[in-house]
Image (cartoon, rainbow, N blue to C red):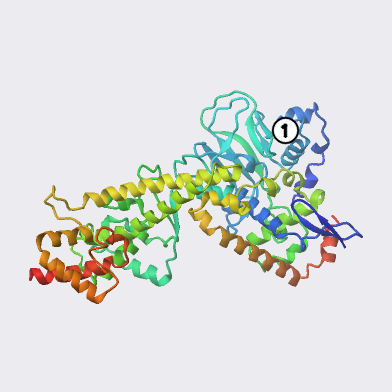
Amino acid sequence: MLELSLPFLSLTCCHYCQKRTLLTASSESYLWAVTIITSRAFISQAILPTLPKFSLLFPVIDLLDHSPTARAQWDFTVRDSFSLKLSQPFRFGAELFNNYGPKHNGELLYGYGFAIPNNPVEQIHLKVRFGEAAQWELAQFNKPGVLPFDLDPQLCEEPFDNDLLFRPKGSPLGRYRNRVPCLAACPPQYVLSNYQAALRQRVIRAEAVQDPSFPGTRITLATIKPFYAFIQRRLAELSQSRSAVSSPQNKKQRFASIYRDGQLKVVRSLHDELSAHLNSVRTSDASPKRGILTTTEALKTLKQFSPEHYENFKTGVRAGWPNFDVEEDIEALAATAEEFLVWALLLVVMHAVAS
Amino acid sequence: MPPPPHQLHGQAAHAEPGTHNAASNPAYSDSNPRIRQLVDWFTGAGGWLHPDVRIVQDEAGGFHVIACSDSDTDGYQLVAKGHIRSTLSYLNLDHTQDAVPNVTSPLQRLLGKIPNHILTYLFLVEQRILGDKSPWEHYIACLPVQETMTTPLFFSEEDAAYMKGTPVYNSLSAQKTALFEEWEKARSFMVKAGLSDEAVYQACDL
């Protein structure tokens, strides 16, 4: 057998008939075929509705590139043809575009090999796994008098999507219905899941929440917290990624940068929105309203108004956790692993003092 | 059952530039024989392209569709129409149907044994290998090759670093592994189905 090495295929030929064989094609050939199909194929349903859905290549129709603003119409005649219509004036030499639908840059890059600067429908994608048991549990929340934040009950009824898309303010796709503006960025299944966890942590039954459309500041904040943490992590990773590379040197790097920067822009927008919300519920000297305060602020308040209790508290924490000093770490408490513990102990102490 | 477009385009395929066919098919560039062959094959299979539309090839080798006149339009106008008989998918291997042309291939033995989408991938690889023996020869000749592909599966580590921190980056390694395993599994099915080299050679005698 003759071995031939070609730029893109590794083939073996029989020297009798010089024919090539599929069996010895390379995995790169397979990747090539996968990419061609996923980037260029159309779904069969409209033209062959009686068969189970599958992908098929439509030669020449698939030559038109994508533009999110192209006005395109796809008409299928069953078992016959695919007609592509455009509402676009012809200008000599100007490219004609198809419209693959509103896709964020992750879909465009992975599926088609390009990304659009300032993609108007850019979103943050998160893949999760809602098992059957989890889905069943969350479905118990989809009842009048239980469903929180005025979530859309219809969306909560649909099969739980494991591909979550978070949308910034002003997204032309609209946001998800939610009484809390910063949570409107989140798919309802995600909000429900965090809400369920917040109630479980506090040993509160969903039916016991008096007004689920606004279940109170603490539960609302507990529902927001995982989202905030997720956005903070993404922001840190993307910012770090951006600063770690030089200017793109080729097309692939350019598209990758466009995608990354688009994600960064949306993540920053979500982060700013969340931060603004958290600041709005912070307590302050200027405002007499009740609000949230950090563990650091609570300790400083205790130190200011009851120095003796503060010293006793410090001593008590050191007795139980000799390697941790409340005074030393007071400013950076939020960054330590002990913060939640200190907060819990502080609540106990304050309750005892108040009693 | 209509024959595959490979045979249908016999009449148009030999048209010379400046002939009636060239005038009635302005959608190809006379200086690019690959485009002319593609368009002739496409229209021979029942496809249609707007007379003010042209297929061009850029410097990087990619194909695009451009307008070759100035005209305004009210509403939507038909720009291109593709006939089902020019399509390519696993369905061409299924001789129990007549919606698309039947193609004879050893891969028919895998119908119902592997997922249809994987069979479509294998079928496309096979048709590419067949070269001028494939009914889709002129279409496949215009498809991008690996070197020009810009999907993340073809990114080097250096390229991928430019999207570190994104979901596509985070899932890339797992995707590549999964696809490689899928390919290996497909090959094992081909072997089990008796797709020996000899059988493939016989099928190549089209």
Locate the C terminus of chain A and report the quarter of the image it occupies. Answer: bottom left
Which one is nearer the viewer's eye here, A181 or B122?
A: A181
Q: Exactly how many numbered labels are in the figure?
A: 1
Residue at the image position 69 percent from the left and 35 percent from the top:
B59
Q: Can see residue B90?
A: no
Position in image of residue A164 (x %, y %): 43, 56
Please report, as a chain letter, where disc 1 is located.
Answer: B
Which one is nearer the viewer's eye here, B14 or A205?
A: A205
Which one is nearer the viewer's eye here, A125 or A101?
A: A125
Q: Is residue B122 left or right of residue A301?
A: right
Q: Residues within 10 Å of mark 1 (few under 14, many from 20)?
A: many
Q: Is residue A214 left or right of residue A170?
A: left
Locate the N terminus of chain A and report the quarter of the image it occupies. Answer: bottom right
Q: Can see residue B188?
A: yes
Residue at the image position 81 percent from the left and 62 percent from the top:
B200
Q: Name the amino acid type tagged 1.
A: Tyr
- Which residue corresponds to mark 1? B28
Element assignment for label 1: loop
Q: Is residue B55 above or below residue A156?
A: above
